[in-house]
Amino acid sequence: MARKALVEKAKREPKFSTQAYNRCQLCGRARAYFRLFKMCRICLRKNALEGMLPGVKKVSW
């Protein structure tokens, strides 16, 4: 679980645009972030398996 202070810090407008960083909107995780879905890999997988993300399905080959 992400620290609340870092989640709030990420929501603020940075002084310079290069200081901005992405966090998962659901859990606040900073690593393994998917820009297209705006969530981390863990939340992405959970929501995809539950069918919450339209157009995303599990693949097997």
Image (cartoon, rainbow, N blue to C red):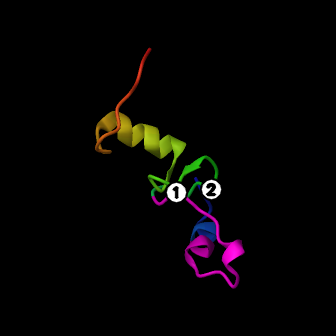
State the residue in front, 8 or 57: 57
Q: Residue 1 at what x, y percent from top left?
A: 58, 52
Q: Earlier in the sequence, mark 1 or mark 2?
A: 1
Q: Are marks 1 and 2 in contact (CB under 8 Å)?
A: yes
Measure the C-alpha gap from mark 1 to mark 2: 6 Å
Residue 50 magenta-drawn? no
Q: Which mark is residue 51?
A: none
Q: Residue 28 at what x, y percent from top left?
A: 54, 59
The structure residue drawn at horizontal position 32% and vertical position 45%, both measured from the top left corner, is 53
The structure residue drawn at horizontal position 60% and vertical position 71%, both measured from the top left corner, is 10
Quarter holding residue 17? bottom right
Residue 19 magenta-drawn? yes
Callout 2 secondary element:
loop
Q: Amino acid at mark 2?
A: Ala
The residue tagged 2 is 30
Label 2 Cα neighbours within 10 Å, binned few <14 / some 14-19 / many ≥20: some
State the residue in front, 26 or 18: 18
Label 1 Cα neighbours within 10 Å, binned few <14 / some 14-19 / many ≥20: many
Q: Which residues are magenta?
A: 8-25
Quarter holding residue 61? top left
The residue tagged 1 is 24
